[in-house]
Amino acid sequence: MAERTQSGRTGGQRFARRTTRWIEAAEPDAGQRAARRLAEELRAIAALLLETAAPAALLEELAEEAGRLRERLAAEPGGRVRYRNESGGPAEPEPVFLDTSPLIGLVNPVAPPLRLSLDGETVHGVCVFGRAYEGPPGNVHGGFIAAAFDELLGATQSLSERPGMTGRLTVRYRRPVPLHREVVLTGRLLRVEGRKILTEATLTVDGVLHAEAEGLFVSVDPARLRGERAD
């Protein structure tokens, strides 16, 4: 028999406990703040590189500087990303997804990044896709739109009692999504049918629908996932 989520308050409390992966659970420490700032600068550099008409000599000089920065960073010990449990304390399960995700990772230079927030039982996402995500001229590549939906609905399905993994994602592209404009995604948990978690989402620009998606997630035993990661 299909189940619906409880009230927005209950769902929100449950979401907050389960989603240190998607939404900040604790104040970032000095190392995280510095790493996020560095990633932000790298995103800005990448955006400028895609647009620049700088002469070859300058680009060669900048490449040399970038190489020296890479060597300095490579000389430092790895494994700085901390681990947390659901209460926000140190733990084994997984790295802080907010930092490492290719969509919302604030320390991941390839992330737009997509910023997520919770309103009752609705998950909102906001981002601006720059030139690095271009597909059709002046518009966002459809693959990045699908990835953003997958990330948003991954957070949305965590409102259920037994969050899982993507089983099917269906995207309908209504209009091209322009670059350099604020994109707003909205995700909703529809229902839970046994291990199946059904969700839906929309993508709008200036209030106009540009794409929509339906996601089917399948609950997976967390112990099984931990075992597979260990292998």
Image (tube, grey):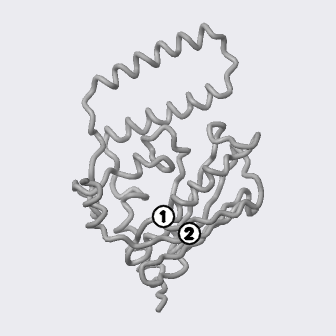
Secondary structure beneath label 2: strand
Mark number displayed over residue 215: 2
Name which residue lies at 63% across and 42% down. 133
Earlier in the chain: of badge 1 and badge 2, it is: 1
- In the rendered view, does 223 fall on the left or right side of 151? left
Name which residue lies at 31% across and 71% down. 221
Task: In the displayed orientation, state which residue is furthest to the front.
Answer: 231
In this view, the mark in front (1 or 2): 2
- In the rendered view, does 82 fall on the left or right side of 158? left
Local packing at callout 2 (Cα closer than 10 Å; few below 14, some 14-19, many 20+) is many
Q: Position of residue 209 (x, y in %)?
A: 74, 63
- Which corner quadrant of the image does residue 204 belong to? bottom right
Location of mark 1 (residue): 154
Say above or below: 143 vs 72: below
Q: Hey, what amino acid is under mark 1?
A: Gly
Q: Position of residue 93 (x, y in %)?
A: 26, 57
- In the rendered view, does 14 fall on the left or right side of 202? left
Secondary structure beneath label 1: helix
Name which residue lies at 56% across and 54% down. 147
Q: Hey, what amino acid is under mark 2?
A: Gly
Name which residue lies at 38% across and 78% down. 161
Q: Position of residue 219 (x, y in %)?
A: 40, 73
Q: CA distance from mark 1 to mark 2?
A: 9 Å
Local packing at callout 1 (Cα closer than 10 Å; few below 14, some 14-19, many 20+) is many
Q: Position of residue 94 (x, y in %)?
A: 30, 54
Q: In the rendered structure, are the residues bearing label 1 and label 2 in contact, judged by CB atoms less than 8 Å apart? A: yes
